[in-house]
Image (spheres, rainbow, N blue to C red):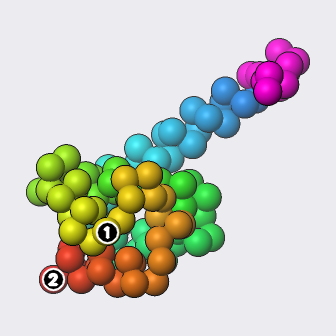
Amino acid sequence: MPLPSLSPEQRAAALAKAAEVRKARADLKEQLKNGQVTLAELLDRAESDDVIGKLKVVTVLQALPGIGKVKATQTMEKLKIADSRRLRGLGEQQRKALLGEFTA
C-alpha cells in the first residue's frame, strides 16, 4: 500500500509533530533517569497520555538509573514481557510485576 501523497504544508506539519513527540519522549526518559518521574507515575499516565503510552517498555527500563540493556532485557524475559510491548499494552499483572521489580 503506497503512502498517501502529502502537500508540502502537510508534510512540514507531520515532520514538526514527529520532532515534538521525539523531544517529549527524550525529556521523559531524562526525567526518569534523574528521578524526577517514577516508573509508577509513568505507568499511571500511560493510559491517558499518547506519548507515554507508546513508549516501549524496554526503552523505559533502560532509562531507569542503574539499568542497562542487559538487565532490562533479562527483566523483560523474567517477567515474560515481549520486547515489542509498549507501556499502554501492559496487562495489570505485568504492571504489578514491573513495579515489584523496580520499586523499593
Q: Using the image, determine if residue 51 lies above or below residue 75.
A: above
Q: Report which residue position mark 1 lands on.
A: 80
Q: Report which residue position mark 2 lands on.
A: 104
Where is the C terminus found, in terms of image quarters?
A: bottom left
Q: Secondary structure at mark 1?
A: loop
In the rendered image, residue 6, in percent from the top left (x then y), is placed at: 85, 21
Q: Using the image, determine if residue 13 lies above or below residue 89.
A: above
Which of these two is toward me, 81 or 88? 81
| Lateral position of residue 83 relative to residue 88, left or right | left
Q: Is residue 102 magenta?
A: no
Q: Amino acid at mark 2?
A: Ala
| Lateral position of residue 4 relative to residue 42, left or right | right
In this rendering, which labeled residue sits more in front, label 2 or label 1? Answer: 1
Specify whether residue 9 is in view.
no
10 Å crowding of disc 1: few (<14), some (14-19), many (20+): few
In the rendered image, residue 96, in percent from the top left (x then y), is placed at: 35, 84
State the residue at coordinates (45%, 58%): 85
The quarter of the picture where residue 36 lies is bottom left
The quarter of the picture where residue 80 lies is bottom left
Which of these two is toward me, 89 or 46? 89
Q: Secondary structure at mark 2?
A: loop
Where is the N terminus found, in terms of image quarters?
A: top right
The reply to whether discs 2 and 1 touch (Cβ–Cβ < 8 Å) is no
Q: What segment is highlighted magenta in the picture?
A: 1-12
10 Å crowding of disc 2: few (<14), some (14-19), many (20+): few
Q: Using the image, determine if residue 45 lies above or below residue 70.
A: below
Q: Residue furthest left?
A: 66
State the residue at coordinates (62%, 70%): 48
Specify whether residue 48 is in view.
yes
State the residue at coordinates (86%, 19%): 5
Q: Is residue 4 magenta?
A: yes
